[in-house]
Image (cartoon, grey):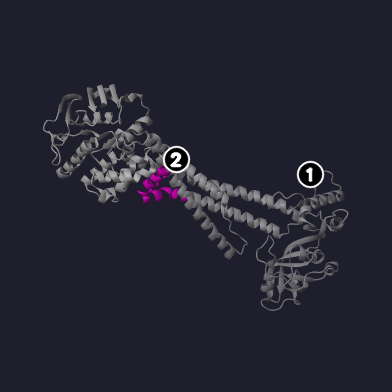
Amino acid sequence: MKLKYSIKTAINGLRTHKSRSALTILGIVIGITSIILIMSLGQGAKGLILGEIQGLGAKNVIILPGKEPGGPSDLASLFADSLKERELNALKNKNNVPNAVRVMPIIFGSENGVYGNEIYKLSLFGAGEVMEALFDLKPERGIFLSDEDVRSKASVVVLGSKVKDELFGASEAVGQKVRIKNNTFRVIGVLPAKGQSSFINFDESAIIPYTTMQQYVVGTKYFNRVVVEADSENNIDAVAQDIKKTLRDLHNITDPEKDDFFVSTPAEVAEKLGTVLGTLTIFLAAVAAISLVVGGIGIMNIMLVSVTERTKEIGLRKAIGATNKNILTQFLLEAVILTGLGGVIGIILGSLFSFIASILIVKFAGLDWSFTFPYNAAILGLVVSSLVGLVFGLYPARQAAKKSPMEALRYE
Amino acid sequence: MNIIEVKDLAKVYANDGVETRALDGVSFSIKKGEFLAIMGPSGSGKSTLLQILGLLDDHSYGSYTFSGRSVKSYNPDEIADIRNEKMGFVFQAFNLLPKSTVLDNVKLPLLYSKVPEKDWERLATDAVEAVGLGHRINYEANRLSGGEKQRVAIARALVNKPEVIFADEPTGNLDSKSGQAVIEIIQKLNREKGHTIILITHETYTAEYAERIIRLHDGKIESDVRVTNRKLDGKDFVK
């Protein structure tokens, strides 16, 4: 018997029991839908985070004071004092780090900004004039910090769009004075709204010269970060190596284990986050896969019922010349077509839900989330669902094939 | 030429250590083109005999030669092929696929055969017309009357042009009028197309359409006689 007719026969068998077939594959549909949804969302999240890291500047190497952070909650670097003006100057020296284009320290803190009766809790950044170029922060109104502001410890501030809205509403902010930690700052620029487009939400920030911040706000001499921009993405690793060598020489460190600083490149960060996210996705998908096993058992159960119910049909087919293999193939194909169909429906539903989710995320969370059709997951889903049919359909199909035609015909 | 020869055929069932002899040493032969009726009360072994002859069941003792070859020498796939190519079956309960059309039901044996696909439609249509159901060809089987269903089953049995047609109480579920139509068709196939017919029945009325009647009792042949006053449909009565 040709495969074409085996498939036709199997499809006819399924069509005779439409609602039962539909209920049978529900488990598989749910399983594959959740796997596709999880994997698609995982891919989206990964894309988002990688995009964010790119947004932070793919050419930027970030130096943290203190040891390598043990995890996201390791706040030791905030209090470490290994990065100061001396280190900054060493890094700015072209002989030490030839591929560095810009070097800039950052200090951060959280302070209240006050204008008239309005108070807003903002993220305060002490930075240099190169921050504008490093993070693409061209003011919408007014100007950014200048090197003169940094040198003279000027009391000037550039406000994020939300800070401006909260403190000034619709009125003009540039030229006005705001108070931050008992110091008066003149607003020289307002940034455009950028949304939660990176780990730093510049909309809720205010940027002042780092020299001013050290002197008047935090009262310390060290930096929280130093950002070094490489001349090209290809030279990132060279820059990172040069930075390490410079700082080790400066701090008389011979054993890299004893580094009192930590150099982080965007690629490293991306890789780490990607690994974490990938593991999480696989774990969730594995949990969803359990439902496939449950669905498979459901298939086996219904196929056994179907085989018993169709004993007479099996007897007849054998009487008119069907071999055991023909019968086995027919019932196995029924199971595989059922689960395969469940897989296809699951892939469609999973992608659809993921697509809807991506629209909602963009609309309500304002994230730069993009929907990607999870090709790998789709192929995997199709293969796995067909395999479920093959594995759980085998036992019922063998039961069918084993029936003796005479007993099958006599069955009432 | 004998298409079927059985010698000392026996079938023994063992149930909880108790042996039941459904068939107990049966010997006879059937010529090609013969119309044989097997009769007997229930429990006489007539259904068992038909199942063994139709290769739906094994025999325990004795020999069974089909078309000159002992059936013990065939493997299961070869037996499936013989059932498909050389035998046709008609059952009391019709055993049609209820949701399939008349044509698809009749085509069913062809699906498992070596007949080229291009001939399927023609063969099936011919078979349906041979039983006078050309006007019902695209009906779903479950919409037909009992007599029509049995005629579809006959069409299915003869679509592969088998040498032997086995009919197990084909009129058992039918009213007398439909039953008569069915048995007349079976007789016509025998006389016009030369199919060997082996008919099981407990009705003498039906058995008298055959040329020869074997009566079984307790698994043994009680009598094996030629029908002297054979019923023949239509006018071409020959004696």
Please name the amino acid that badge 2 sits on. Answer: Phe
Q: Farthest left residue?
A: B229
Residue B105 at least partly seen: no
Q: Is residue B76 magenta?
A: no
Mark whose residue sits in front, 1 or 2: 2
Residue A347 at least partly seen: yes
Which image quadrant for residue B82? top left
Q: Chain of mark 2?
A: A
Q: CA distance from mark 1 to mark 2?
A: 54 Å
Task: Please state the horizontal and vertical placement of residue B236, each as a whole percent of the image.
Answer: 14, 39
10 Å crowding of disc 2: few (<14), some (14-19), many (20+): many
Q: Secondary structure at mark 1?
A: helix
10 Å crowding of disc 1: few (<14), some (14-19), many (20+): few
Q: Which residues are magenta?
A: A2-29
Please name the amino acid that badge 1 sits on. Answer: Glu
Taking depth in this image into account, of A368 and A200 the one nearest to the observer is A368
Image quarter (top left, top right, bottom left or bottom right) of the N terminus of chain A: top left
Q: Secondary structure at mark 2?
A: helix
Task: Please state the horizontal and vertical placement of residue A211, each as a whole percent of the image.
Answer: 82, 65
Task: Please state the horizontal and vertical placement of residue A357, each as a whole percent of the image.
Answer: 55, 59
Which numbered dot is residue A392?
2
Q: Is residue A329 above or below residue A240?
A: above
Q: Chain of mark 1?
A: A
Majority secondary structure in the magenta region: helix
Taking depth in this image into account, of B118 and A12 the one nearest to the observer is B118
Taking depth in this image into account, of A202 and B46 the one nearest to the observer is B46
Q: Is residue B210 above or below residue A30?
A: above
Mark 1, residue position: A257
Check chain identity for marks 1 and 2: say if they share one. Answer: yes
Task: Please state the horizontal and vertical placement of residue A310, each as a whole percent of the image.
Answer: 33, 41
* Residue in the image at 42% along x and 37% along y: A395
Q: Is residue A47 above or below residue A366?
A: above
